[in-house]
Image (cartoon, rainbow, N blue to C red):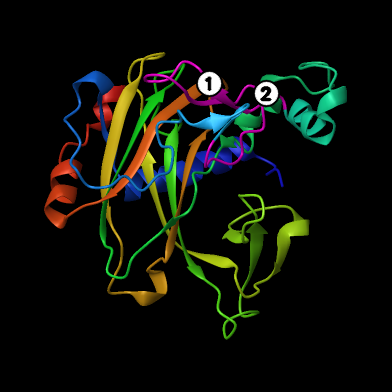
Amino acid sequence: MTPRHPLLLAAAALLLTILLFPALTAEPASKTAKPTNRKNLIANSDLEQGNGNVPAGWSGVDGMTVTWGQDGNPGRCLTFDTSVFQEDKKAWKTDEKNFSGRGRGKKTGQYDTVGAHEGVWAFAAPVDLKPGDVHFIITADVKSPFKASELCYPMVIIRGFQRVTAEKAGQDSSWFHTHHPGGPGYSEMFGPDALRRTSIEGDYLMVYRHTLACRTVKPNEWQHFEMGFSLPLSKPQFYPERLLIKPYAFWPSGVYSFDNITLRRSTAEEVKAVNQRRQSIKAIE
């Protein structure tokens, strides 16, 4: 479903993110501190494993808007092309073999790109939490063709879900997306009418949202971002059983790259220390 004024809606949503979650640390990836020995929970986070044109454990790599890139930090990475026209994306997904080529449709203006509308994303394999999990550190290396602005920047979206039990089935209605082939449906805040339905047992309802904002300072250079966050253990209705990690880019239209997306358990002290290193918004002025 495409919003009538997508850039305005995106700007409003991102402004809310800015107010809730300040800008995060951006530093050259080569100068970051050594990681701790806590286990990384993101499968194939360095994007080095895979078959054919698809990295193992990742979904949404459609071969046009999302590809398994070669110019990683180092090695392989996810490459997001938000300059793809919506018409081309639809034609490619409908009949890839007979796709006539990019830019041959009727709508080829700068606001006809996926970056001006839904954006581009991929999903890591789901992360199931253990009882009592609270504190986490998430990191990502990102390369953008543009210096970020206050409202437009690549990001890594964190979404938390609770599994729908037989007792709670049918109590909620949402757009349920299947992000991984053969996987369950995950509720979302938007979607086509065909995906709108009441919940069934085995679905996952979204109960938690957070975002790692990746406000790049230098175009076409890899930068490292990290953030600490704590789950609301004292509020069971908002405490997730499973996390989905979603790198995302939209506007300005261009080619963005993501690599080394990690998630690990942490402590309250480390979360505080990491978040104290957040850069000022003035860094992108």
* Residue contact at pointers 2 and 1, CB within 8 angstroms: no
Which quadrant of the figure has residue 94?
top right
Given the image, on which type of amino acid does mark 2 rest?
Answer: Val
Q: Nearer the viewer, residue 254 or 78?
A: 78
Quadrant containing the C terminus is top left
Earlier sequence position, callout 2 versus callout 1 = 1
* Distance between mark 2 and mark 1 Cα atoms: 16 Å
Left or right of 86? Residue 97 is right
Assess whether residue 233 is covered by the magenta stretch. Answer: no
Q: Residue at x 76, y 17 (%)?
A: 102
Name the spot of residue 39 as percent of width and height, x first.
27, 47
Assign a secondary structure to mark 1: strand
Vertical order, 88 against 271 (above or below): above
Left or right of 235? Residue 33 is left
Residue 139's tag is: none
Which residue lies under the disc numbered 2? 84
Q: Nearer the viewer, mark 2 or mark 1?
A: 1
Assess whether residue 67 is covered by the magenta stretch. Answer: yes
Q: Residue at x 54, y 67 (%)?
A: 205
Q: Residue at x 57, y 43 (%)?
A: 9
Vertical order, 72 against 51 (above or below): above
Given the image, on which type of amino acid does mark 1 rest?
Answer: Gly
Dominant secondary-structure state across the stretch colored magenta? loop
Residue 69's tag is: 1
Assign a secondary structure to mark 2: loop
**Mark 2: few, some, or many residues within 10 Å (few <14, many ≥20)?**
many
Left or right of 27? Residue 269 is left
Find the magenta span and give its range.
Answer: 56-85
Q: Residue at x 36, y 41 (%)?
A: 212
Name the spot of residue 245 as percent of width and height, x first.
45, 47
Vertical order, 201 against 137 (above or below): below
